[in-house]
Image: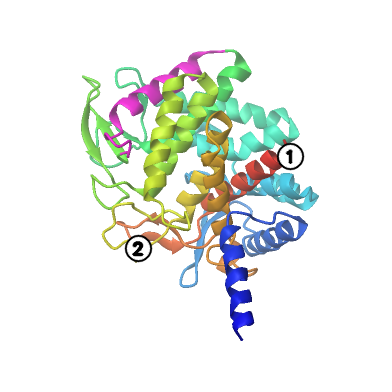
């Protein structure tokens, strides 16, 4: 009996010590493929794509004007890369085609999400210029929202704000950097850099936690309102917002080589790491007084993991270790859905907008996208 107890203890210790290791092999990808294939089969709409799912409401399908519209196509492009299965290329093309017209929208700042995650991956993988042309047009549409007095791209056209800029907007700069390189025209990069500088100056507190929304006076260019719209309070650290900032400044460093952006990314990373629980999957807000008995946000964790993989290329291996641990947790039964469950989405336990009682503890298409991106980056590290 004592020997059995000792064996159990050692086995448990072994698992705990190796919890940051995920067996990424054909069987693992096959499981992901089966799950996402279920989602594809359940959402065959010829014009819309799936955003989320719940047992009570079923699937939420959205068109090309929704900010999350590009993530399903992007996920399927990543699945094609990870598996080599032509069926995923077919699904990716079909879901990219559904977005036709998105590149002309000038009423949203989210074109990076909507276009670069879909058409961007499509062009990177296939080289088909039809995808390239969509990205170039989307970049033209996006920069119409730039105000040189403020020094930012406007985020929202709704609400009582005069010129709201949200931390999420940092994620849309990558497309502008790409377009400047592709066209040789510096105007897109110049706008991206100006936006990054203005955001760095006004969105962050002393500990490098960020506000969600900063609204500017368009006459003076000065910030007049600082809020956290989707977090717990104006002074709190909304989990996904911190992930957006980390990812955005990591990309900005990659594209500029300017040390101040790497410094910013590392300071944001330090704030995040100081507030992650033992399993490294982010709480929806770092300042929720109900912690640890509150919601996790697997979408924030997936974004953070993907950003950490890239950040580790430019600095410390501690970010690689953190990314590995996050991916291991997300790949566990606690967060990775069983085949046929969760509506076919990969990750469970995401939070969209808790104060608005919207998409709470459900799957979200962008969580799956950044999880697959993190897996691809993990694979690339192993194969380098």
Q: Residue furthest bottom?
A: 1
In this rendering, the answer to whether 38 lies above or below 219 is below
- Residue 186 forms part of the magenta stretch: yes
Q: Residue furthest front?
A: 2
- Can residue 336 be seen at all in this image of the molecule? no
Give how far across and how far down residue 144 sits, in percent.
Answer: 43, 24
| Left or right: 291 as drawn, with respect to 14 | left
Q: How busy is the neighbourhood of tag 1: few (under 14 within 10 Å), some, or many (20 plus)?
A: few
Label 2 secondary element: loop
Q: Quadrant of residue 25?
A: bottom right
Circle nearer the N terminus (2, 1): 2
Q: Quadrant of the N terminus?
A: bottom right
**Residue in the image at 43% along x and 33% along y:** 266
**Residue in the image at 26% along x and 59% along y:** 289
Q: Quadrant of residue 16?
A: bottom right
Label 1 secondary element: helix
Question: Which of the numbered marks, if any, corresponds to residue 98?
Answer: none
**Residue in the image at 34% along x and 21% along y:** 151
Q: Main secondary structure of the magenta part?
A: helix
In this rendering, the answer to whether 348 lies above or below 286 is below
- Residue 137 forms part of the magenta stretch: no
| Left or right: 14 as drawn, with respect to 348 | right
Q: Which residues are magenta?
A: 185-210
User: Spatial distance from mark 2 to mark 1, Cα to Cα?
Assistant: 37 Å
Q: Which residue is mark 2?
A: 292
Number of marks in the rendered image: 2
Q: Which residue is mark 1?
A: 383
From the viewer's side, name the closer residue of 184 and 234: 234
Give how far across and how far down residue 278 sits, in percent.
Answer: 44, 57
């Amino acid at each position: 009996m004592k020997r059995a107890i000792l064996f159990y203890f050692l086995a448990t210790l072994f698992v705990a010590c190796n919890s940051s290791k995920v067996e990424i092999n054909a069987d693992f990808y096959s499981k992901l493929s089966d799950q996402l294939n279920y989602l594809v089969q359940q959402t065959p709409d010829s014009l819309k794509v799936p955003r989320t799912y719940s047992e009570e409401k079923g699937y939420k399908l959205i068109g090309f004007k929704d900010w999350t519209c590009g993530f399903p196509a992007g996920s399927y492009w990543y699945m094609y890369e990870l598996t080599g299965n032509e069926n995923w290329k077919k699904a990716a093309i079909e879901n990219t085609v559904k977005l036709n017209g998105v590149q002309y929208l000038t009423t949203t700042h989210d074109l990076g999400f909507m276009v670069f995650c879909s058409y961007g991956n499509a062009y990177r993988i296939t080289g088909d210029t039809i995808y390239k042309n969509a990205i170039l047009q989307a970049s033209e549409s996006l920069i119409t929202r730039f105000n040189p007095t403020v020094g930012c791209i406007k985020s929202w056209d709704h609400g009582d704000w005069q010129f709201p800029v949200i931390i999420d907007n940092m994620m849309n700069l990558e497309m502008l950097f790409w377009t400047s390189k592709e066209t040789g025209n510096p105007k897109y990069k110049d706008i991206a850099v100006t936006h990054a500088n203005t955001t760095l100056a006004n969105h962050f507190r002393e500990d490098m936690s960020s506000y969600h929304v900063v609204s500017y006076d368009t006459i003076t260019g000065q910030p007049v309102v600082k809020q956290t719209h989707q977090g717990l309070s104006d002074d709190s650290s909304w989990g996904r917002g911190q992930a957006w900032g980390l990812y955005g400044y990591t990309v900005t460093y990659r594209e500029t080589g300017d040390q101040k952006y790497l410094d910013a990314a590392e300071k944001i990373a330090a704030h995040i790491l100081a507030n992650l629980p033992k399993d490294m999957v982010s709480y929806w807000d770092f300042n929720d007084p109900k912690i640890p008995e509150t919601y996790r946000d697997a979408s924030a964790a997936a974004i953070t993991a993907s950003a950490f993989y890239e950040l580790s290329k430019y600095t410390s291996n501690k970010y690689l270790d953190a990314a590995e641990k996050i991916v291991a947790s997300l790949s566990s039964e606690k967060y990775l859905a069983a085949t046929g469950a969760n509506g076919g989405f990969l990750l469970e336990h995401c939070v969209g907008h808790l104060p608005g009682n919207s998409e709470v503890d459900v799957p979200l298409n962008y969580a799956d996208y950044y999880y697959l991106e993190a897996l691809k980056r993990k694979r690339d590290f192993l194969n380098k």
